[in-house]
Amino acid sequence: MLTQTIYESPSRFVRLEVDHTVGGGHSHPADLTTVEMAAVLRGIIINEPVKLIPSLPFFPKDEEPPRHPAFTSAEVIFFAPLLVQALKTATPDQVVTFYQSVHQTAIIRRITSGGLFLDGDELHIIVSNYRSPTHYSSDLGMADTHDDRLMPLRSITPLRAKLDFEPAAALVPPQSGSFFSRLFRSDRPELVVRLSQVRAHLLEKNREPATPNPLPSAQPPS
């Protein structure tokens, strides 16, 4: 797999890669603004499986509700300009990949990784890993020696969460396709978003008038 680095640090990277599992002929290079990319990242929603515990009227400060944004505000600010730069640099046979590693303990890290590519107006967003623990193995007692930095489009743990997008009007419904397309792509955690709808949503938000501050009530003349 050929790679081209846009940004790299020990815990994060954005790269351009040739990956035959997503094909080629993409609409790259692509011209998006950082504002548009930030709207895309903010729109990705994670629906976690419901835990089998009694429901509580509130969530602790360090616990998120089952439905929550995939990226924090700080992550959106960091990744949005890098992903814009990557799409502007990408060739039709490349896909943009991203990776983030966060230490949970001294030996366990949580990995979020995936990729982006554009076909016409449709932006494909692959979330291969979402806070997935390293050293995961389906067989107990067997260590996983896979280097999670080498293949960001590979899931290192099963993604049990469901992906969603807001606004819902921008989300392209999954296509049934042929038997072979379902066979090779049904397990991919992927969203397809119409950029034209994302841009229309941003324009609509910009047209919304700001809520005016209430005027002080007039005092009757004395």
Image: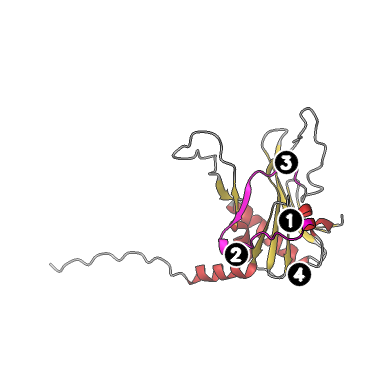
Label 2 environment density (alpha carbons within 10 Å; few <14, some 14–19, many ≥20)? many
Label 4 environment density (alpha carbons within 10 Å; few <14, some 14–19, many ≥20)? many
Q: Amino acid at mark 3?
A: Thr
Q: Circle 3 sits on which residue?
A: 157
Q: What secondary structure is found at the residue carrying circle 3? A: loop
Residue visible at 73% across and 69% down in the picture: 30
The answer to whether residue 19 is seen in the rendering is no
Residue placed furthest toward the left: 222
Distance CA(mark 1)–CA(mark 3): 17 Å
Residue numbers of the magenta segment:
155-179
Q: Circle 4 sits on which residue?
A: 27
Q: Earlier in the sequence, mark 2 or mark 3?
A: 3
Residue 86 picture location, percent across and down: 75, 62
Quarter of the figure with the C terminus: bottom left
Residue 131 picture location, percent across and down: 67, 43
Q: What secondary structure is found at the residue carrying circle 1? A: strand
Q: What secondary structure is found at the residue carrying circle 2? A: helix
Mark 2–mark 1 CB contact (< 8 Å): no
Residue visible at 78% across and 31% down in the picture: 139
Residue 106 picture location, percent across and down: 70, 33
Residue placed furthest toward the front: 179
Please tell me whether mark 4 or mark 2 is closer to you in this view.
Answer: 2
Q: Circle 1 sits on which residue?
A: 115
Distance CA(mark 1)–CA(mark 4): 15 Å
Q: Is residue 174 left or right of residue 143?
A: left
Q: Earlier in the sequence, mark 2 or mark 1?
A: 1
